[in-house]
C-alpha cells in the first residue's frame, strides 16, 4: 500500500466515523422526537376521554333542562287557563 493509499484510507475512515457520529446524533434526535410525540399522544388521548365525559354530562344536563322547560310551559299553560276562565 502506497503512502497516498494509506492517507486516502485514513481519510476515508475519518469520514466514515464522522458519518456514523452524524447518524447517531440524528438517531438520538429522532428518538427524542418520537418520545415527545408519544407523550403528546397520551395527553391528547386523555384530554379526548375527558372531553367525551364532559360532553356526556352536558348532554344529560341539556336533556334535564328541556324536561324542566316543558314542565314549566305546562304549568304556565295551566295557570293561563285558570286566569282566562275566571
Image (tube, helix red, strand yellow):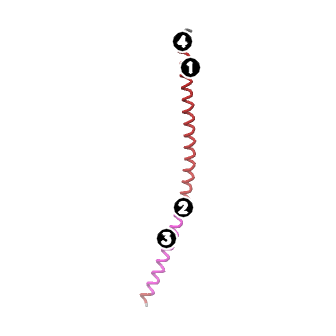
* Label 3 secondary element: helix
Q: Which mark is drawn over residue 66?
A: 3
Measured as percent of width and height from the top left, residue 40 is found at 55, 47
Sequence-wise, the earlier of marks 1 and 4 is 4
Dominant SS in magenta: helix
* Disc 4 target residue: 5
Whether tag 3 and tag 2 are in contact, CB under 8 A, the answer is: no
**In the image, is residue 72 above or below residue 27?**
below
* Label 2 secondary element: helix
Whether tag 1 and tag 2 are in contact, CB under 8 A, the answer is: no
Give me the C-alpha separation between circle 4 and circle 2.
Answer: 75 Å
Give me the C-alpha separation between circle 1 and circle 2.
Answer: 64 Å
Q: Which mark is drawn over residue 13?
A: 1
Q: Which mark is drawn over residue 56?
A: 2
In reply to whether residue 71 is colored magenta, the answer given is yes
For marks 1 and 2, give the one nearer the viewer: 1
Identify which residue is drawn at 48% across, 74% down.
Answer: 70
The residues colored magenta run: 56-82
Measured as percent of width and height from the top left, residue 84 is found at 41, 87
Horizontal placement of 34 versus 81: left or right?
right
Residue in the foreground of this view, choosing between 35 and 72: 35
Neighbours of disc 2 within 10 Å: few (<14), some (14-19), many (20+): few
Amino acid at each position: 500500500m502506497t503512502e497516498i493509499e494509506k492517507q486516502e484510507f485514513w481519510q476515508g475512515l475519518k469520514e466514515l466515523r464522522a458519518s456514523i457520529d452524524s447518524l447517531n446524533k440524528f438517531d438520538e434526535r429522532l428518538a427524542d422526537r418520537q418520545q415527545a410525540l408519544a407523550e403528546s399522544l397520551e395527553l391528547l388521548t386523555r384530554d379526548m376521554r375527558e372531553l367525551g365525559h364532559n360532553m356526556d354530562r352536558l348532554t344529560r344536563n341539556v336533556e334535564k333542562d328541556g324536561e324542566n322547560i316543558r314542565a314549566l310551559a305546562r304549568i304556565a299553560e295551566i295557570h293561563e287557563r285558570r286566569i282566562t276562565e275566571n
